[in-house]
Image (cartoon, grey):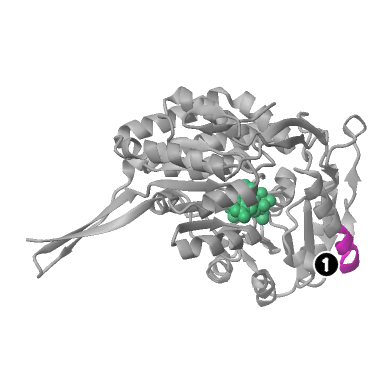
Amino acid sequence: MKIKNFINGSFQNPVANEWLDNYNPAYGKVYGQTPNSSKTDVELAFQAAKNAFPSWSQTSVDTRSKILIKISELLETHLQRFAEAESKDNGKPLHLAKSIDIPRAASNFRFFGNAITQFSSESHESIGENAINYTLRQPIGVVGCISPWNLPLYLFTWKIAPALASGNCVVAKPSEITPVTAFLLGEICNEAGLPKGVLNIVHGLGTTAGQAIVEHPEIKAISFTGGTKTGAAIAKIAAPLFKKLSLELGGKNPNIIFADCDYETMLETTLRSSFSNQGQICLCGSRIFVEASIYEKFKTDFIAKTQQLKVGHPSQNSTDIGALVSKTHLEKVLNYIEIAKTEGKILCGGNQVIIPSFKNGYYLEPTIIEIDNNNCRINQEEIFGPVVTIMPFETENNVLEMANQSEYGLSATLWTNNLKRSMQFTQQLEAGIIWVNSWMLRDLRTPFGGVKSSGMGREGGLESLRFFTKTKNVCIKY
Ligand code: NAD
């Protein structure tokens, strides 16, 4: 498969005709090529977006909404094709791509297609001054959207949909590791009647194509999801250019389990929050803290459940854990497992899995590590694989301190039926998203984002529409 850039509504080779190999992680083999785009390609995409902006920004909200909803419907029509492509490109189980990734990409378009029809701005009457203020929220112009490989189309569209809904034109770059569904999206946008140049998709490396988007002086806002180090590099470039910046970065999220929780629901959900998508979700609860009185029981049950998970080819229905996204990533995770051998005790997993028919695939056993110190590297650094730690705690203060003792602050999960404790913990946990007695229960209207090294700004619902618009206050004296 040869992927192409989507610029001005047509599919184009990169100007320099340079290409990157695209791997199928389930086989560990190259199965296609993706453009290794340069600054020149980004410039072409920018020019197309700039030309499309005057018309798109003046297109009625109703028309924009209809086009976005049409894209959503077409994604649903082509669910199977997109899910197969996502699973093949990323290594995630096909049933996961079919039930989570692609439906959510469709929901993103539908949600923001509807949300824009409900978006309004404020007015303030200055009583005693005979003046009225009203606030305009206008599209910014050309904006940049850069996304990671773990939830490829899901996160790509989470940015693009609100940017388009609010009247901007977009230059977007998906991860070079998982470019296929973004490529397929171009076809659907044309079919849905999205005008040429409104969305432009440039493929390539972060340090070249990605950086060219961030550095572009006329791209006035950047919405980025990815690693914390990349976020810092982008912020350094964008700050002196005074760009609007939304950064959704890494996490090392605590999962806090009290003895009074609904045990079976907690156990099932903890299995998911540990290992879904091979543990490659920024919201996974990779630091599990368990109240001492149920620690031994939890440990036995959690190990037993984890050992039942089937590592297998992503296309098989029985597969719980597919392949990790790349060889480099597998090696990174295995390296942390080596560190874990000195910092803790491996309770289960820890080994690469060689599946005879797909022996070069990037498979890894789900791994549980028992530790006794929250400050060790494996509890402080983001591993981003099917690897979790467990450790007991004695008191509320003790676990709250450990939960917050982290560079990151994306999400936290709390399991308890004690209302007072829930209220205290939700107040004091340092994270942007907190789930009590659940995990990954998402309502697209809610603000999404992290604190500390997990990012800056919020996306979701009105927060996204506010991010992708510029605010102008008008004061009229009468
Ligand atoms: P990454 O930072 O390596 O890459 C993300 C994207 O940025 C890719 O498209 C990449 O090409 C691009 N990029 C890289 N360097 C760039 C640069 N200098 N300028 C511009 N663009 C550049 O991240 P990844 O490995 O693809 O994704 C995994 C990370 O993403 C994890 O840390 C994970 O926690 C994080 N993540 C966060 C969220 C969230 O919502 N907070 C969601 C998913 C993933």
The structure residue drawn at horizontal position 58% and vertical position 40%, both measured from the top left corner, is: 154
Tag 1: amino acid: Ile
Residue at the limit of the structure toward the front, as seen here: 16
Residue at the limit of the structure toward the left, as seen here: 478
- Chief secondary structure of the magenta portion: helix
Residue identifier under label 1:
371
Residue closer to the observer: 200 or 352? 200
Q: Rate crowding at label 1 as few (under 14), some (14 to 19) or many (20 or more) other CA atoms within 10 Å.
A: many
Q: Is 63 included in the stretch rendered in magenta?
A: no
Image coordinates for residue 457, horizontal then vertical, percent = 48, 60
**Quadrant in which the C terminus appears:** bottom left
Q: Is residue 410 visible?
A: no
Q: Is residue 341 above or below residue 212?
A: below
- Dot 1 falls on a residue whose secondary structure is loop
Residue closer to the observer: 9 or 311? 9
Q: Is residue 21 above or below residue 299?
A: above
Q: Is mark 1 within 8 Å of ligand 1?
A: no
Q: Relative to 113, is 201 on the left or the right?
A: right
Q: Is residue 405 above or below residue 198?
A: below
* Location of residue 179 (image quadrant): top right
Q: Is residue 453 above or below residue 80?
A: below
Image coordinates for residue 323, horizontal then vertical, percent = 79, 40
The structure residue drawn at horizontal position 59% and vertical position 46%, both measured from the top left corner, is: 209
Q: Relative to 158, is 330 on the left or the right?
A: right
**Quadrant in which the N terminus appears:** top right
Q: Is 344 included in the stretch rendered in magenta?
A: yes
Image coordinates for residue 222, horizontal then vertical, percent = 49, 52
* Location of residue 340 (image quadrant): bottom right
The structure residue drawn at horizontal position 40% and vertical position 37%, both measured from the top left corner, is: 113
Q: Which residues are magenta?
A: 337-345
Image coordinates for residue 203, horizontal then vertical, percent = 61, 39
